[in-house]
């Protein structure tokens, strides 16, 4: 047993969580590319790497989906509601930020 459930059930939850993650990630990517443009996204993409927690969350059911929904909330609450653009959100998500920039 893993986390109080049989292995087959746990794996089924993991697979369903991954499917939901891919669905939300694809929809979010399409939304951003429609609002920013693919060419602009490619030109302005930074070299920021994902943190270890985000990489390991792939093995926790629904964690990646929740991270994607968290990014959607950040876009809405902290960028669009304050008058920033989708492109500024994209730059924030893909570039390293140092303390000197603040």
Image: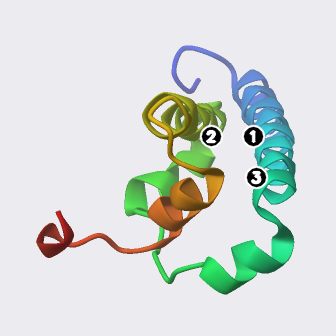
Name the residue at 79% across, 38% down: 24
Left or right of 54 on screen, residue 102: left
Residue 82, position in %: x, y? 44, 34
Left or right of 33 on screen, residue 7: left
Name the residue at 54% across, 14% down: 4
Residue 18, position in %: x, y? 77, 41
At mark 2, the secondary structure is helix
Does 94 appear above or below 93?
A: below
Q: CA distance from mark 3 to mark 2?
A: 13 Å
Dot label at residue 21: 1
Pair 1/2: label in front: 2
Q: CA distance from mark 3 to mark 1?
A: 16 Å
Q: Which residue is the site of mark 3?
A: 32
Residue 46, position in %: x, y? 52, 80
- The picture quadrant where one finds residue 87 is bottom right
Dot label at residue 6: none
Q: Which residue is the site of mark 2?
A: 68
């Amino acid at each position: 047993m893993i986390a109080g459930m049989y292995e087959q059930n746990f794996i089924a939850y993991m697979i369903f969580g991954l499917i939901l993650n891919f669905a939300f990630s694809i929809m979010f990517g399409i939304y951003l590319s429609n609002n920013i443009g693919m060419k602009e996204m490619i030109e302005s993409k930074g070299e920021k790497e994902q943190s270890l927690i985000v990489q390991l969350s792939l093995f926790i059911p629904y964690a990646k989906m929740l991270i994607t929904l968290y990014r959607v909330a950040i876009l809405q609450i902290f960028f669009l509601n304050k008058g920033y653009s989708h492109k500024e959100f994209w730059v924030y998500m893909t570039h390293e930020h140092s303390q000197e920039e603040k």
